[in-house]
Image: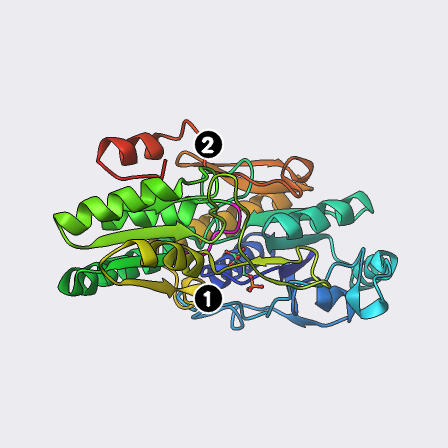
């Protein structure tokens, strides 16, 4: 059996742990030959693969990034390198030439969408849910999320001590795209005073009220704001548009917008920190290493059972799988009835409304 593996979209801590688990399981269990596709779907378009033997995947479980490289603009159905042309037939021909019995796609919603469309052309695919945003449909946890939450929590803890010393309002802007999971979980973990997420458009006057009230008592306020958060009746803060990208909008900057809105109305100073890609870099947490290993192992089991065109998922603490068609291009935000939101409210955290 010959199996290809690729990592698509933005990188994320734990990718190497998945690559390692898929390759080791397939080699040990099935004696399979494993090929690593370089830079996501771009490697299938530009015909760049390399062998992944046991030696190639040794010692990488704790390494950040992806040993295969990735690319977040390489969609074979609308290929930027060919003026937006569909080069998927050439990709299919290459997969056939390589003699791949299966292709493991480790990626987010965009990659799962491409994986699904490639599977419809006859490539047997297995998907693995990756993203720090934790916003893939049908899975409770994407690997990489736990690491991002740990990094953001540490940053919020640090902002609290300096904010307390100076009596300031400290705003931390997190990643997460249109989902508020990172800001919500890290905000709760660090005891942030205000958590603003995309799913609950905030009222500026309410944020101001809390800051003023705290100015009179504790003298400092910590705000965790997700990059996709917006005020009621307001718009998203877009950092830039990358037209060649399948997902052209890059969010970012709401933390600065919020500071500009709050500062003139407050006696104390307001400071904003935007963590950016620090949230995506470096070594995965032990939780993410284990989850990534479980996902990689489960992906190999699907291949062994020849159950294709599915993505492995986590439900509670158990692994399962769902058809790629069910996850392709879909997102999962924080639902209005999520118990974490109630826990936040009941422990005195403001959600800005
Ligand atoms: O989807 C992961 C993510 O890190 C988002 O949280 C963020 O909005 C986006 O990717 C940033 O993309 P890029 O790396 O292209 O700037």
Q: Quadrant of the N terminus?
A: bottom right
Classify 212 as above or below 275. Answer: above
Kindly identify which numbered label has been placed on residue 256.
none
Q: Is residue 188 left or right of residue 98?
A: left
Q: CA distance from mark 2 to mark 1?
A: 26 Å
Q: Mark 1 packing: few (<14 Cα in 10 Å), some, or many (20+)?
A: few
The image quarter containing residue 323 is top right
Q: Which residue is mark 2?
A: 335
Taking the image as shown, residue 335 lies to the left or right of residue 311, namely left
Q: Quadrant of residue 331?
A: top right
Q: Residue furthest top?
A: 337
Residue 176 among magenta residues: yes
Is 253 in front, or is 330? 253
Task: Name the residue carrying label 1.
Answer: 277
Q: Residue at x 39, y 30 (%)?
A: 338
Residue 202, x across and y down, in percent: 41, 40
Q: Residue at x 27, y 55 (%)?
A: 266
Q: Quadrant of ligand 1?
A: bottom right
Q: Earlier in the sequence, mark 2 or mark 1?
A: 1
Q: Which residues are magenta?
A: 174-178
Q: Is residue 316 magenta?
A: no
Q: Does residue 188 appear anywhere in the picture?
A: no
Badge count: 2
Depth check, front residue: 39 or 126: 39
């Amino acid at each position: 059996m010959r199996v290809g593996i690729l990592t698509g979209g933005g990188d994320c801590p734990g990718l190497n742990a998945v690559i390692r688990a898929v390759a080791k399981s397939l080699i040990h269990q099935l004696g399979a030959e494993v090929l690593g596709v370089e830079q996501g779907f771009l490697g299938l378009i530009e015909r760049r693969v390399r062998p992944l033997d046991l030696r190639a995947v040794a010692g990488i479980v704790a390494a950040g990034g992806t040993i295969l490289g990735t690319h977040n603009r390489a969609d074979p159905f609308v290929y930027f390198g060919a003026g937006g042309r569909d080069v998927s037939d050439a990709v299919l021909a290459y997969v056939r030439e390589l003699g791949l019995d299966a292709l493991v796609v480790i990626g987010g919603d965009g990659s799962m969408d491409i994986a699904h469309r490639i599977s419809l052309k006859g490539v047997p695919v297995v998907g693995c849910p990756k993203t720090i945003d934790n916003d893939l449909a049908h899975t409770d946890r994407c690997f990489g999320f736990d690491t991002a939450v740990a990094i953001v929590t540490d940053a919020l803890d640090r902002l609290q001590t300096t904010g307390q010393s100076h009596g300031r309002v400290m705003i931390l802007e997190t990643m997460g795209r249109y989902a508020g999971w990172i800001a919500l979980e890290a905000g709760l973990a660090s005891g942030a005073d205000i958590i603003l997420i995309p799913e609950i458009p905030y009222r500026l006057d309410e944020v101001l009220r809390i800051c003023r009230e705290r100015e009179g008592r504790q003298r400092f306020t910590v705000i965790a704001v997700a990059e996709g958060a917006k005020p009621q009746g307001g718009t998203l803060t877009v950092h830039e548009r990358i037209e060649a990208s399948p997902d052209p909008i890059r969010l970012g900057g709401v933390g600065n917008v919020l500071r500009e809105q709050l500062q003139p109305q407050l006696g104390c100073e307001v400071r904003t920190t935007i963590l950016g890609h620090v949230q995506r870099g470096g070594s995965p947490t032990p939780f993410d290493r284990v989850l990534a290993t479980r996902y990689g192992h489960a992906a190999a089991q699907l291949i062994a059972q020849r159950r294709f065109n599915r993505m492995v998922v986590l439900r509670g603490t158990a692994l399962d799988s769902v058809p790629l068609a069910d996850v392709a291009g879909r997102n999962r935000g924080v639902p209005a009835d999520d118990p974490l939101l109630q826990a936040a409210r009941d422990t005195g955290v403001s959600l800005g409304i």
